[in-house]
């Protein structure tokens, strides 16, 4: 007999009792339970238990439960496609953040009508309530079993020797899969296929283009309806849509993917952010640098980027021809800013040195990864590097985190952020510089700092920079996809590569620690997230146009110009709408352009020295003395009110 614990409840059951039956014996099972966790691994409820253990039960309210639910739905999708198009070749079908997808190699283009037909077949499969049965096969038998599915054969051949090769059968359909899955297809009460796009096999443009069908599924129709309504609202807030409507940015085919044109209004928002960040960093002891946009390959060889990041760089020349000079656009600023430190000998008394730079960077992202301003090939970042003594590491790391949190909180983005401690993978050492001992030391130091700060974080394995662990601050866009907005990295390797010594109090030459960090991250990505956060209605301090002044008639134009001049003298971003249009039309247009304040002036306002102010945020109309409005506006901008 074995003892199985479910939190504070336990059950004594026979060996090989399933998770489901053990949970039933403990009185903790319900229809809502979808999968389980044992020793950090998510498993089916049909998994047999062979020893004493602690088991977590997952419902749709847990990430693990959702992933199980959506992964099963992806198998239902694959089964439906195979029933309708038997010649289609299967690839992979994982759960993702908001549902699932499956990639198919098909000669038939999946139109909207075909997606509707596939949905109909999926409904039949759900109604059949097919049980999902897991089984395993030896390698030779597995290859024979999947001989008509070339992509599955490729996956099997890549599995390490001795690896268990598992399959899931549901009725007339079987797929290579590690699981876990639901008991049966009948649990998938509501689903929707949302789109079909192209996707290269394994994300490599050298491979064949496949067709990727996306979908989502929920335990109830009401839950699915609520999600789809949320997606529709997200589409309305999509920065790709709003950013173009408000003339913040555009893209041009002949310039290329991932190379947006930031229009005057968008540029004004970025300029406002940049001035704020540079001034804030100066208050905190940062020294401003300005470094080149490119360098010879020799610089990147010293830093290690040439060995570890070459595929992500734009190279000017032949990277393999050592007889000729070869340059590359910079993908990051660190090896450039190090030269400021190396400009002279350094003493321990000078440390910490905090370098900051508004850096334009270039990264050769895959075309399939491009998305508006979120992921681009040229971008500008609030980058910085701190050179410090080991005893200063915790205080300086804390300062970097406080700065990042202050910036994100001021922008209103912090509430949408999570924190991830990104570590190396000791099983994938070719990707990283340094020894296991160095990584253990750096990660141990970083863990101690994060725990001392009391930060709530997740761990991401194999997500570190090649030279050290990092804290990634993740922010979700309106579609729920997470992207890194800020990073703070501990680097214990590059100082030695560049010979960045300092003379310590004992007159010995020692190597410093380096912190790589951003304060607000990438300006383009931040602009995208702000557009979505506020649906284009930026807080007044950030708005590209803060006030629009509108005279009721030509007779009031001179007073409108006086009001405009008073605002300009306060450095308010103001427009004067002197067009010969009805005032109602002008006000509606200002509302559509999401201008924070519409100021209307007529003969009475001109005579009284007042302004009629429409406040976009509060939806109010109020007439007040001009000086009162100027004072109110000055406070709102200075305090960066949201």
Image (cartoon, helix red, strand yellow):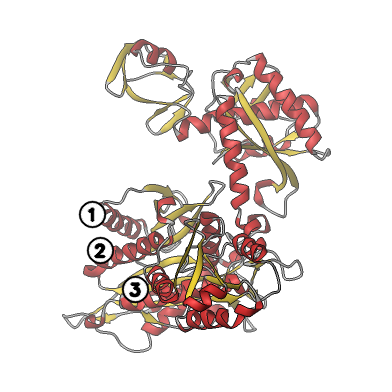
Vertical order, 563 against 446 (above or below): below
| Nearer-the-camera pick, 463 or 593 | 593
- The quarter holding residue 500 reads bottom left
Query: Element type at marker 2?
Result: helix
The local crowd at label 2, few if under 14, some if 14 to 19, many if 20 or more residues have their Cα within 10 Å, is some
| Nearer-the-camera pick, 581 or 54 | 581
Q: Would you name the residue on which mark 1 appears?
A: 452
- Mark 3 and mark 2 residues within 8 Å of each other at the beta carbon: no
Image coords of residue 175 (percent x, y): 65, 27
Image coords of residue 455 (percent x, y): 30, 51
Image coords of residue 416 (percent x, y): 44, 51
Q: Earlier in the sequence, mark 1 or mark 2?
A: 2
- Mark 1 and mark 2 residues within 8 Å of each other at the beta carbon: yes
Q: Would you name the residue on which mark 3 appears?
A: 386
Q: Earlier in the sequence, mark 3 or mark 1?
A: 3
Which quadrant is the C terminus positioned in? bottom left
One can see residue 597 in this view: yes
């Amino acid at each position: 007999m074995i003892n199985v614990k479910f939190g504070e409840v336990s059950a004594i059951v026979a060996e090989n009792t399933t998770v489901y039956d053990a949970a039933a014996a403990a009185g903790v099972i319900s229809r809502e339970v979808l999968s389980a966790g044992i020793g950090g691994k998510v498993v089916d409820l049909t998994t047999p238990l062979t020893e004493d253990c602690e088991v977590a039960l997952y419902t749709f309210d847990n990430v693990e439960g959702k992933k199980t639910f959506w992964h099963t739905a992806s198998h239902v999708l694959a089964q439906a496609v195979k029933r309708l198009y038997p010649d289609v070749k299967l690839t992979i079908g994982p759960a993702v953040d908001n549902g699932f997808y499956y990639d198919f190699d098909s000669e038939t283009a999946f139109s909207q009508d075909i997606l509707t037909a596939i949905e109909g077949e999926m409904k039949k499969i759900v109604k059949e309530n097919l049980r999902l049965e897991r089984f395993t096969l030896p390698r030779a038998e597995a290859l024979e079993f999947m001989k008509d599915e070339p992509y599955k054969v490729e996956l099997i051949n890549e599995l390490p020797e001795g690896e268990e090769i598992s399959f899931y059968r549901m009725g007339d359909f079987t797929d290579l899969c590690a699981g876990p899955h639901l008991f049966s297809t009948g649990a998938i009460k509501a689903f929707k296929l949302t789109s079909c796009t192209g996707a290269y096999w394994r994300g490599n443009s050298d491979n064949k283009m496949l067709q990727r069908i996306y979908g989502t599924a929920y335990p109830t129709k009401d839950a699915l309806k609520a999600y789809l309504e949320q997606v529709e609202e997200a589409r309305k807030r999509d920065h790709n849509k709003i950013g173009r409507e408000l003339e913040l940015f555009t893209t041009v085919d002949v310039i290329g993917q991932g190379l947006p044109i930031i229009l005057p209004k968008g540029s004004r928002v970025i300029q406002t952010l940049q001035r704020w960040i540079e001034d804030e960093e100066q208050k905190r002891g940062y020294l401003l640098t300005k470094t080149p946009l490119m360098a010879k390959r020799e610089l990147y060889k010293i830093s290690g980027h040439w060995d570890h990041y070459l595929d992500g760089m734009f190279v000017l020349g032949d990277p393999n021809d050592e007889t000729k000079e070869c340059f590359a656009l910079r993908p990051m600023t660190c090896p450039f800013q190090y030269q400021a430190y190396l400009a002279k000998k350094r003493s321990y008394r000078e440390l910490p040195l905090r370098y900051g730079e508004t850096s334009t960077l270039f990264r050769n992202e895959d075309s399939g990864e491009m998305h508006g301003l979120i992921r681009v090939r040229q971008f500008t970042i609030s980058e910085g590097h701190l050179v410090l003594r080991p005893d200063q590491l915790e205080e300086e790391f804390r300062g970097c985190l406080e700065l990042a949190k202050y910036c994100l909180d001021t922008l209103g983005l912090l509430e949408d952020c999570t924190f991830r401690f990104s570590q190396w993978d000791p099983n994938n050492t070719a990707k990283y510089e340094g020894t296991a001992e160095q990584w253990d030391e750096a990660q141990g130091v970083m863990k101690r700092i994060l725990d001392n700060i009391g930060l709530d974080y997740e761990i991401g394995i194999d997500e570190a920079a090649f030279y050290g662990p990092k804290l990634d601050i993740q922010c979700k866009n309106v579609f729920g996809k997470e992207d890194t907005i800020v990073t703070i990295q501990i680097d214990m390797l590059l100082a030695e590569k560049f010979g960045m010594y300092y003379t310590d109090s004992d007159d010995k030459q020692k190597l410093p620690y380096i912190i790589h960090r951003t304060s607000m991250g990438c300006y383009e990505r931040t602009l995208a997230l702000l557009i979505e956060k506020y649906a284009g209605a930026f807080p007044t301090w950030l708005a590209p146009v803060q006030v629009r002044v509108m005279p009721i008639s030509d007779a009031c134009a001179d007073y409108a110009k006086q009001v405009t001049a008073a605002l300009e003298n306060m450095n308010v971003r103001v427009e004067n709408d002197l067009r010969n249009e009805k005032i109602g039309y002008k006000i509606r247009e200002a509302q559509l352009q999401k201008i924070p304040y519409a100021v209307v002036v007529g003969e009475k306002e001109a005579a009284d020295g007042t302004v009629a102010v429409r406040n976009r945020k509060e939806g109010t109309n109020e007439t007040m003395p001009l000086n009162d409005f100027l004072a109110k506006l000055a406070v709102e901008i200075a305090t960066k009110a949201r």
